[in-house]
Image (cartoon, helix red, strand yellow):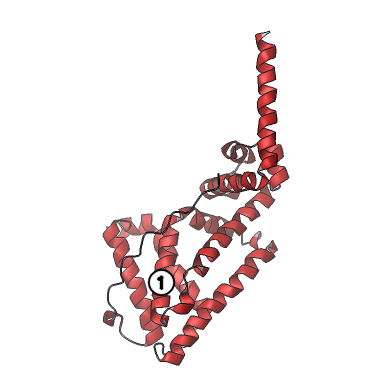
């Protein structure tokens, strides 16, 4: 009798969970992608397991495949969502309405702090580079979302040249790659660099020094002025908390 009652309770729980999935399919997809992002970031593509992702998302493999797809499809969806998130936040920087030097400083500060706040993003980039970008090559979504971003940077640079703030109309793609690289290399290799140079590169004074150095370096390249002429950048404001889906 007790066993039959337990089986009935188990079946009822499964029915209720299925009903929740049906009422909120987008919420389930978001939870699956978030769980998958953590799994792929910590274990890479080869080491990630769909079973662990399903458990972390409060789903099962059948529902995971239904809402997203198999492991390869899920991995690409995670990559696309990761790029979409950073591009969305970059568009909100309002660079078009800032003086060109201030716009570049804001972009550098944002990129640096975004990487600090989202180490999983860096881990995903490392994983996909090990895969020789085989998955990104199949994504039209990622390619299309970068064009407006590149144009936004190009507009800032052209305004800077027109106003006399910048001496060189730098290629916006090269400029962004340089900005991202200045942050990415430092953070991705902080463990070895800290040992080699005998510094804690993630201590707050070291991070502040790094941001100031990057801003001065890039602005010096754009303006033709000495890096020593630029004041220490102001500490960035704390980002507004991002509301998580229920």
- 229 relative to 205, above or below: below
Give the quadrant of the C terminus.
Answer: top right
Residue depicted at 27% across the width and 80% down the height: 228
Q: Hey, which quadrant is residue 168 in on the image? A: bottom left
**Which residue lies most toward the top here?**
1
Determine if residue 59 is in view.
yes
Give the quadrant of the N terminus.
Answer: top right
Determine if residue 171 is in view.
no
* Residue assigned mark 1: 106
- 238 relative to 109, above or below: above
Left or right: 44 with respect to 235?
right
- 23 relative to 131, above or below: above
Question: Regarding mark 1 in the picture, which secondary structure is present there?
Answer: helix
Q: In the rendering, at what x and y percent does residue 180 appear?
A: 46, 68
Q: In the rendering, at what x and y percent does residue 130 appear?
A: 57, 58
**Which residue lies most toward the front here?**
23
Q: Hey, which quadrant is residue 197 in on the image? A: bottom left
Residue depicted at 50% across the width and 67% down the height: 92
Left or right: 118 with respect to 10?
left
Between residue 146 and residue 220, name the one nearer to us: 146
Between residue 26 and residue 61, name the one nearer to us: 26
Residue neighbourhood size for the residue with mark 1, other residues' Cα within 10 Å, grouped as few (<14), some (14–19), many (≥20): many
Q: In the rendering, at what x and y percent does residue 13 appear?
A: 65, 26
């Amino acid at each position: 009798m007790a066993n039959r009652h337990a089986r009935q309770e188990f079946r009822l729980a499964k029915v209720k969970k299925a009903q929740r999935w049906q009422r909120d399919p987008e919420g389930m997809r978001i939870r699956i992608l978030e769980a998958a992002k953590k799994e792929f970031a910590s274990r890479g593509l080869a080491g990630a397991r769909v079973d662990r992702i399903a458990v972390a998302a409060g789903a099962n493999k059948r529902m995971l495949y239904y809402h997203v797809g198999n492991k390869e499809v899920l991995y690409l969806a995670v990559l696309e969502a990761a790029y979409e998130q950073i591009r969305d936040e970059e568009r909100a920087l309002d660079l078009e309405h800032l003086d060109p030097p201030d716009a570049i400083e804001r972009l550098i500060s944002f990129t640096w702090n975004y990487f600090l706040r989202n180490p999983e993003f860096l881990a995903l980039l490392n994983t996909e580079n090990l895969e020789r970008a085989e998955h990104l090559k199949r994504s039209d979504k990622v390619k299309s979302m970068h064009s407006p971003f590149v144009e936004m940077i190009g507009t800032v640079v052209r305004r800077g040249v027109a106003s006399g703030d910048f001496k060189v109309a730098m290629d916006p793609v090269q400029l962004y790659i340089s900005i991202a690289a200045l942050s990415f290399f430092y953070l991705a290799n902080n463990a070895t660099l800290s040992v080699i140079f005998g510094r804690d590169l993630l201590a707050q004074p070291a991070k502040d020094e790094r941001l100031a150095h990057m801003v001065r370096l890039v602005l010096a390249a754009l303006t033709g002025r000495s890096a020593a002429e630029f004041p220490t950048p102001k500490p960035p404001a704390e980002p507004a908390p991002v509301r998580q889906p229920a």
